[in-house]
Amino acid sequence: MNYLFLDNGFEEIEALTTVDLLRRAGISLTTVAIRGNIQVNGAHGITVHADKLFEDCDFADAEMLILPGGAAHLENHQALCDLLKKHNAENKLIAAICYAPSVLGRLGILAGKQATCYPGFEQYLGESYVGGLVVESKNVITAKGPGLSSDFAFCLIEKLAGSEIADAVYDAAQY
């Protein structure tokens, strides 16, 4: 199972494009609200009904953890931070786009890896910052921002399901 975490203020295009394209690829993905309310308000007035609440998930089956950008308080959710650090220590897949790679940087998850992020947050990535649009380094995939949501999602599909599935979704989506 793969999990995408939602907090109030999330970037809708980053979260929903990723959810849509991964599900089109047949990849199991659960959206998780981290603040105890199944309804999560996006940065641009779109409210999403998450699949589950954080506290109702076990995460033992987690293959990839995905953080969309926009939600400026992800790093204040201690249980999520602990989960991300544990997942990284087990060399499992983590993906983050826009603002969210800065959370990984603050948690030390990007040490020894390369990453990108939305302009203005580079300092939180430290020596890991290399720029680029979508960067895959070891067990972490990062992307620069909202306009790269499809590229980010296709990279995740290729990693989780292979290039043949990614190409089929790519063609079906007329991308």
Image (spheres, rainbow, N blue to C red):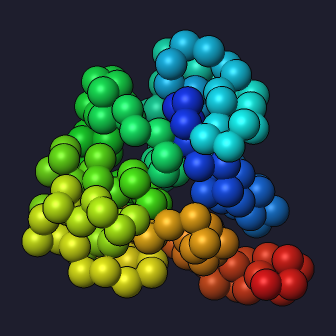
Residue 117 at least partly seen: yes
User: Which residue sits at x=71%, y=52%?
Assistant: 16
32 lies above or below 38: below
Q: How many marks?
A: 0
Q: Nearer the viewer, residue 66 or 167?
A: 66
In the image, residue 87 lies at what x, y percent? 31, 45
In the image, residue 163 lies at what x, y percent? 63, 84
User: Which residue sits at x=26%, y=31%?
Assistant: 82
User: Which residue sits at x=64%, y=38%?
Assistant: 42
The quadrant in which the C terminus is found is bottom right
In the image, residue 127 lies at what x, y percent? 11, 71
Residue 26 at least partly seen: no
Answer left or right for 22 relative to 59.
right
Quarter where residue 10 is shown:
top right
173 lies above or below 78: below
The quadrant in which the N terminus is found is top right
In the image, residue 39 lies at what x, y percent? 70, 22
User: Which residue sits at x=65%, y=30%?
Assistant: 41
Q: Nearer the viewer, residue 32 or 86?
A: 32
Quarter where residue 3 is shown:
top right
